[in-house]
Image (tube, rainbow, N blue to C red):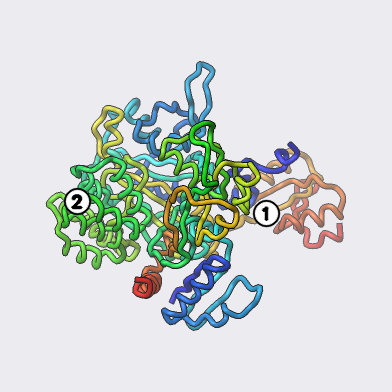
């Protein structure tokens, strides 16, 4: 049997992903041990799991060095990837939202938007026919409107707690986000049997 | 600025000595195979007019072309594709040639991809184009040429995945929905995004039987016999049945050649290039998750150039094939015997000896080093097989031990 290589997003998504694999009968004991290891081989299932940062998961899948990946829809939306997106895993749910102070000057000046997701932001405002200035951030986007760097932000919102603590409110939702199972376009063809077995089991579990 | 002297622009690369040996070996093998199958080599220029490409083509690929401004102000592009220039060549220079017209090429192509992450912006394509045959036999012929070429290169575990663009086109063309929605269907189909595709199709005002087909198509791929059996359970129209029969004939012919084991089908296969009009295909190996070759039928492209002529073809991506062969450890180029000649004699006798040795197929170089220590190091580092010495009278002597010099 062919070895199937799976890339997971480090952190919260990995925790849910491991739970999911266990639920479909894959023994992931080794993965749950606290270690700095990033590559795990599960010989009894012929599965190799690697842990990566979000953006790197689709890169690895696209280049065909791993066969499948589990990654948030936010990462898939921010960039165009050449891969198959086959199952909505329904965990890691949150939203892409536009947020800002409760009152913003409407139309008096051009809007500055701070975000970690410039492409999602650009696409959203272009669709609305609104021209905005995008200020790219690496973290703590909520700070930008407080400090006067931007008027509004576009970010992932899960509970809205961080926004509230910083005196911001959701002004508009852009899209729903959840974890997705993605496949390398070639692996799906060349390892169809093994991959289809895994997908079918996962699909049954999440639906 | 310092970094610009050290780094290369994104997406391009130098080929060092071994890379060049491999590239030449692979390209020579591919071209020899094409030529033995009756294809004739042509070459188009690196620069073309931007306006050569149709509106449809530019809409999806215009942003991905490298552009230059000519001295008279017209826009030029670096060859983004080999097929369109060859079609231009035929329609303007070879119209009266005898058909079927079988052409082949190996060229550099240039494309800007927005997000790079290690993707090439300049790469080599080697391919064939077959003009003037509308029958399924031409589709099968080019696919067989692709398979034979890969076999000759020694590639293993490869597979050619065949689709039929007429299926999806036949469904979408008469459909009365917005162009954008059609594009979304194609996009989700291409990415086998079952989640979004199912959601979108259910929202659109489409007949139920068509909905079933659209949902099923991307799921119908794999072993040809199984796929063809499954698709026949769907509520197909006559045009769809004809399109599938055409595909079946192509597969049967390839199977008849004893190459059936290399074939799989994917009825949900779509390509972003809009000029494809019939059977399309891609090739890959399970050892590397990338597409090694792609091609298909493009009858309507020639209408852009005011000639009516059916056509099909494909292109290999040379550097991906190199990578796949390396991974499989199937890339070995036979090294020729390398001789270093130490010369003491007259120029004319030396020249005669060199010519005689080179005629036997050896690599012969005359030593330019005098110092023994340098010589020993050179022989070691260059893996020289034999050192010979030629004396004043023209006698050649093999030197076993350089230390004794």
How many C-alpha atoms fall within 10 Å of the one at disc 1: few (<14), some, or many (≥20)? Answer: some
Q: Quadrant of the C terminus of chain B?
A: bottom right
Q: Are marks 1 and 2 in contact (CB under 8 Å)?
A: no
Q: Which residue is mark 1?
A: B338
Q: Which residue is mark 2?
A: B206
- Nearer the viewer's eye, disc 1 or disc 2? 2
Give the side of residue B209 with respect to residue B37, left or right.
left
Secondary element at image label 2: loop
Which residue: 29% across, 39% down? B131
Secondary element at image label 1: strand
Which residue: 41% across, 54% down? B149
Q: Residue B186 in the image: x percent, y percent?
A: 32, 49
Residue at far top of view: B72
Image-quadrant location for residue A1? bottom left
Q: Earlier in the sequence, mark 1 or mark 2?
A: 2
Give the side of residue A186 with respect to residue B362, left or right.
left
Image-quadrant location for residue A166? bottom right
Q: Residue B252 in the image: x percent, y percent?
A: 23, 60
How many C-alpha atoms fall within 10 Å of the one at disc 2: few (<14), some, or many (≥20)? Answer: some
The foreground one among B44 and A42 is A42
Chain to which the residue tagged by mark 2 belongs: B
Q: Residue B111 in the image: x percent, y percent?
A: 49, 40
Image-quadrant location for residue B350? top right
């Amino acid at each position: 049997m062919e070895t199937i290589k799976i890339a997971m997003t480090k952190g919260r998504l990995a925790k849910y992903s491991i739970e999911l694999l266990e639920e479909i009968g894959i023994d992931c004991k080794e993965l749950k041990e606290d270690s700095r290891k990033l590559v795990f081989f599960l010989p009894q299932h012929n599965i190799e799991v690697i842990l990566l940062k979000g953006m790197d998961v689709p890169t690895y899948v696209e280049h065909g060095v791993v066969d499948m990946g589990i990654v948030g829809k936010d990462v898939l939306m921010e960039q165009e990837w050449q891969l198959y997106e086959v199952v909505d895993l329904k965990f890691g749910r949150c939203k892409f939202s536009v947020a800002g102070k409760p009152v913003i000057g409407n139309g008096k000046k051009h809007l500055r938007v701070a975000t970690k997701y410039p492409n999602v932001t650009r696409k959203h405002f272009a669709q609305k026919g609104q021209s905005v200035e995008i200020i790219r951030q690496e973290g703590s986007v909520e700070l930008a409107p407080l400090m006067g760097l931007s008027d509004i932000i576009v970010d992932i919102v899960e509970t809205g707690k961080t926004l509230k603590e910083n005196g911001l409110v959701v002004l508009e939702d852009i899209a729903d986000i959840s974890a997705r199972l993605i496949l390398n376009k070639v692996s799906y063809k060349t390892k169809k049997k093994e991959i289809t077995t895994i997908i079918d089991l996962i699909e049954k579990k999440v639906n | 600025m310092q970094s610009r002297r050290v780094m290369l622009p994104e997406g391009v690369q130098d080929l060092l000595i071994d890379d060049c040996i491999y590239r030449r070996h692979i390209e020579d093998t591919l071209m020899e195979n094409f030529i033995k199958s009756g294809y004739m080599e042509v070459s188009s220029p690196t620069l073309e007019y931007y306006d050569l490409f149709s509106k449809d083509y530019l809409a999806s690929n215009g942003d991905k072309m490298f552009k230059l401004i000519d001295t008279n102000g017209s826009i030029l592009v670096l060859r983004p594709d080999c097929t369109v220039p060859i079609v231009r060549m035929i329609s303007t220079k070879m119209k009266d040639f005898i058909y079927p017209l079988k052409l082949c090429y190996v060229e550099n192509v240039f494309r800007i991809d927005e997000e790079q992450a290690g993707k090439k912006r300049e790469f080599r394509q080697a391919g064939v184009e077959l003009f003037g045959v509308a029958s399924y036999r031409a589709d099968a012929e080019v696919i067989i040429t692709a398979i034979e070429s890969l076999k000759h290169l020694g590639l293993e575990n490869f597979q050619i995945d065949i689709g039929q663009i007429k299926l999806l086109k036949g469904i979408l063309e008469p459909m009365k929905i917005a162009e954008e929605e059609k594009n979304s269907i194609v996009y989700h189909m291409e990415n086998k995004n079952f989640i979004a595709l199912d959601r979108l199709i259910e929202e659109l005002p489409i007949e139920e039987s068509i909905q079933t087909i659209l949902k099923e198509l991307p799921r119908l791929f794999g072993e040809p016999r199984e796929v063809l059996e499954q698709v026949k359970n769907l509520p197909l129209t006559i045009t769809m049945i004809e399109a599938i029969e055409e595909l079946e004939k192509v597969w049967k012919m390839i199977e008849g050649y004893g190459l059936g084991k290399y074939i799989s089908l994917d009825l949900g296969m779509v390509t972003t290039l809009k000029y494809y009009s019939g059977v399309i295909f891609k090739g890959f190996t399970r050892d590397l998750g990338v597409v090694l070759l792609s091609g298909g039928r493009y009858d309507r492209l020639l209408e852009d150039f005011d000639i009516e002529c059916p056509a099909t073809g494909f292109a290999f991506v040379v550097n991906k094939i190199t990578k796949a062969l390396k991974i499989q450890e199937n890339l070995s180029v036979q090294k020729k015997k390398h001789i270093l000649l130490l010369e003491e004699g007259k120029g004319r006798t030396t020249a005669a000896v060199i010519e005689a040795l080179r005629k036997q197929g050896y690599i012969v170089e005359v030593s330019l080093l005098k110092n023994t220590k340098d010589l020993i190091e050179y022989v070691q580092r260059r893996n020289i097989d034999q050192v010979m010495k030629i004396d004043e009278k023209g006698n050649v002597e093999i030197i076993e031990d350089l230390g004794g010099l």
